[in-house]
Amino acid sequence: MRIITIGMNTSLVYKVGLCACIGYFDGMHLGHQRLIEKTIAMSKEKGCESALITFDPDPWVTIRNQKDVHHISTFRERINQAVGLGIENIVILQFDKEMSRLSPEQFLTDILGRLNLKGMVCGFDFHYGAKGMGNAETLQRHAPFDVFVVDAVSDEKGKISSTRISECIEKGRMEEATAMMGRMFEMEGVVIHGRNKGTSMGFPTANIQYSPEYLMPKTGVYACYVQVGSEKYRAMVNVGHNPTMNYSEKVSVEAHLLNCHKDLYGKHIVIYFVSYIREEVKFRSRENLIMQLEQDTRNINALLEDYESAIS
């Protein structure tokens, strides 16, 4: 896998022939995957390498001066997902104010023209150039290479999109998000030391230091899986403020692994969200909290057992 970075001052002209798809690819959902599948097929037809062209930062950060923009997946995850799907080259466009002001014609010649493109794949709603004046139709009309436009990928509720997936995650509707992405929503991070309140109650938790780029799920308790190295474990995960015994102003993400007793401090883990179990509640006593956690454990084990049976 190669990473090619292009900014306004880049003099590079990449000579290897490429077929590329273009977009931001947040969540790498089924619609995005359709673009990648077509890109790989086109690259094989034309005897060249496949590539994914994306933007850094998020165009809304540059165009609308937005700060603290949250995403379904981090930039690193999007690159890894694309490579996992078979993409051979990642082209990162350093999307600053100057690049955002290029006309569609300038973007095509001055930016995409630095790549030896033999073909391109875009979504039907793709826009480019200042104020989004360029679209899939103008790209097909003016590009000196073949352009294939992928139609909307839809389910029974309409077009699959990052916006719909984000809404599901924020409302705890993880099954719907999974269906649109073709995989579970995930968060990764390094396990850091907490206040050991869970350990004192018999429910030790792995508190992860997560990227501020993540879109945060609805606060509450989730049935999850946690990946530690090559091993995956069932887990009860709390997203929230721990109002009963260990209040935190910042939203914490803590995982209690149901069948693992390893020391996880300092380890990199990945949490996969399966289903929302209940809202976060402030309990009247430590004993009431423990009773609820015991019930949550039973509910999560039963839910994940059913899930495993359904996919086996």
Image (cartoon, rainbow, N blue to C red):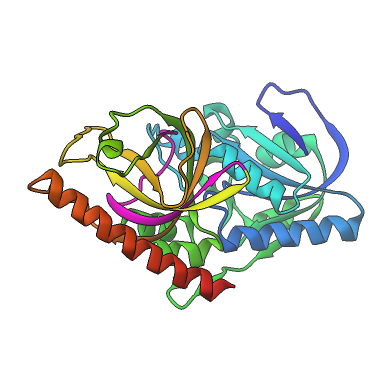
| Residue 32 image point, x, y percent | 61, 58
Q: Position of residue 137 (x, y in %)?
A: 65, 60
* Observer able to see residue 172: no
Residue 176 x %, y %: 43, 67
- Does 85 lie within the magenta span? no
Give the image quarter of residue 295.
Answer: bottom left
Residue lying at the far right in this picture: please name it: 47
Camera-nearest residue between 271 and 92: 271
Question: From which residue to which does the magenta span run?
Answer: 208-229
**Does 215 appear in magenta?**
yes
Identify the residue at the far left of this view. Answer: 284
Q: Is residue 48 left or right of residue 137?
A: right
Front residue of 214/249: it is 249
Looking at the picture, does residue 163 appear above or below residue 153?
A: above
Nearer the observer, 38 or 301: 301
Q: Position of residue 105 (x, y in %)?
A: 67, 42
Count of labels in the image: 0
Q: Is residue 299 above or below residue 220?
A: below
Residue visible at 66% across and 63% down in the picture: 34
Relative to 32, is 237 above or below? Answer: above
Is 82 situated left or right of 98 in this image? right
Q: Quadrant for the C terminus, please.
A: bottom right
- Residue 176 versus residue 50 in the image, above or below: below
Q: Tell me which residue sits at (81%, 61%) in the image.
A: 41
Q: Is residue 6 visible?
A: yes
- Quadrant where the N terminus is found in the figure: top right
Measuring 50% from the left and 74% from the top, which residue is drawn there? 155
Is 75 displayed left or right of 147 in the figure?
left
Which residue is at 49% across, 38% downward? 262
